[in-house]
Amino acid sequence: MSVHQRIAQCVLVAALMLSAGSAWAQNTELRKTFFKEADAAKAAADAAQAQLLAPRSYARGMDEYNDAEFALERGRNIETVRSNASAAAEHFKVATTAAELAATALAQVMKSRQDAANARAPELSPDIWSEAQRKFGEAIRLLERGDLKGAKRRDIEATSLYRDAELIAIKAQYLSETRNLLAQADRARVGRYAPITLGKAKQLLADAERELNENRYDTDLPRSLARQANYEAKHAIYLSEIVRRIRDRDMTTEELVLQWEKPMQDISGAADIVPDMEDGPTRLAAELVAYIENLNNENQALGQENSENEMRLTEMQEELAALDERLGGATAERAALIQRLEAQARVKEQFEQVEKMFAPAEARVFREGDNIILRLTGLTFDSGMSQIRPESFDLLAKVEKAIDVFPRSELIIEGHTDSFGSDDQNQVLSQERAESVQQYMINAMRIPTYRLIATGYGETRPVASNETESGRARNRRIDIVIRPNIDAS
């Protein structure tokens, strides 16, 4: 190729590129002009979920919109582009209006649909979810055509199906493992060898299912029941194997008892307790429980003492450092510091005095800084009630004596519940119980109202696991917080 031919080719390519760039720039400007209204209408339709709630009008708008874009790209008549874009804008506006109407008219079914989706119904209950989706689609189409009566019928049908799918999905999440375990137990004929334990597992599963049927959104109790059912099912499978071995004479009853005593002997050795089980494990178990409780109490006391020492040391270091920077008035301020430390020492003595007033079954007494906490383990209420029972009066008399040890102290009555029941109900119940104790203190103990504060915390401050019965019992409590007046003392 000659030099002249190459130059001509370069000129041609440059001309084509310039022409293409010019056409692109021209199309961009034309698009801004003709699509401004259509783009705004489409954005509004998308925000109103018109593709879901007004599919017919939205689809017509998209057809016109796509035709306008195609005509613009192909360089068709400008009036064609303008006409398609204008028609698209009108359809999108109609779709937006229809979608907003549907969002109001179908609010209930849309909420049920979202709840079911949150519960993973498309995955865990696909057949019912698909049928609900079909009914929902029919309701939207009927509403878009103006058939309000027909749309309402489909709305009700879809809502019911979504709720069914949601409940099945929730049960699948919480109860599937239990059902699988029970099926495994039935295949292994566990009921023949461990009928009591297996029956308990089946009853717990039935209780969990009943709770979900009655209140599917408060899953704390059914989840706990399902977990207990899992344990009992596994335990039944284990026990059935033991019973089968004994019946088949692979193990004697004596060998079984000795095998089960071995772990208690090992635990006793670690606790330095003689494993005396000549009359059975009852006495040894009581000794081990007492040993563990003493360890817990000692650990708590050491923790409190360490916290107090650290706090006291920090305070002394800060105040003495400040005093060292100032010479004037140092003697008086040092005296005030010493006086405060003496007051804190008196609070510690008073705490030890109060600690001796209560048996473990009545109250646990511990410190948080200068505050004294009376955890009234012996103060219980009837289920769902806040009235103080007469059998608690003797314990409250001891509480009054403990309060008298700290004259002019501020008293905070804290109500707490376990996690079973709704959050709002637990909050209200804990507040009512705290106020019931507060009123008793005002009426029976003659404590001035200004010294008392009653606060309910519901289930928000557990001190034990809510997954066990004993843990839930510990979480259902009244705590009395005594704030000594250090300056007054």
Image: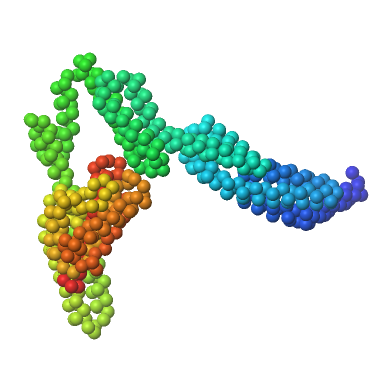
Q: Is residue 352 left or right of residue 168?
A: left
Q: Is residue 399 above or below residue 1?
A: below
Question: Toward the viewer: 450 or 482?
Answer: 450
Q: Is residue 285 left or right of residue 41?
A: left
Which residue reaches farthest bottom? 328
Q: Is residue 442 above or below residue 203?
A: below
Q: Is residue 204 left or right of residue 135?
A: left
How are the residues colored? Answer: rainbow
Q: Position of residue 105 (x, y in %)?
A: 58, 46
Which residue reaches farthest top? 248
Q: Is residue 317 above or below residue 302?
A: below
Quadrant position of the C terminus in the picture: bottom left
Can residue 459 be seen here? Answer: yes
Which residue reaches farthest front? 149
Q: Residue at x 29, y 21 (%)?
A: 191
Quadrant position of the N terminus in the picture: top right
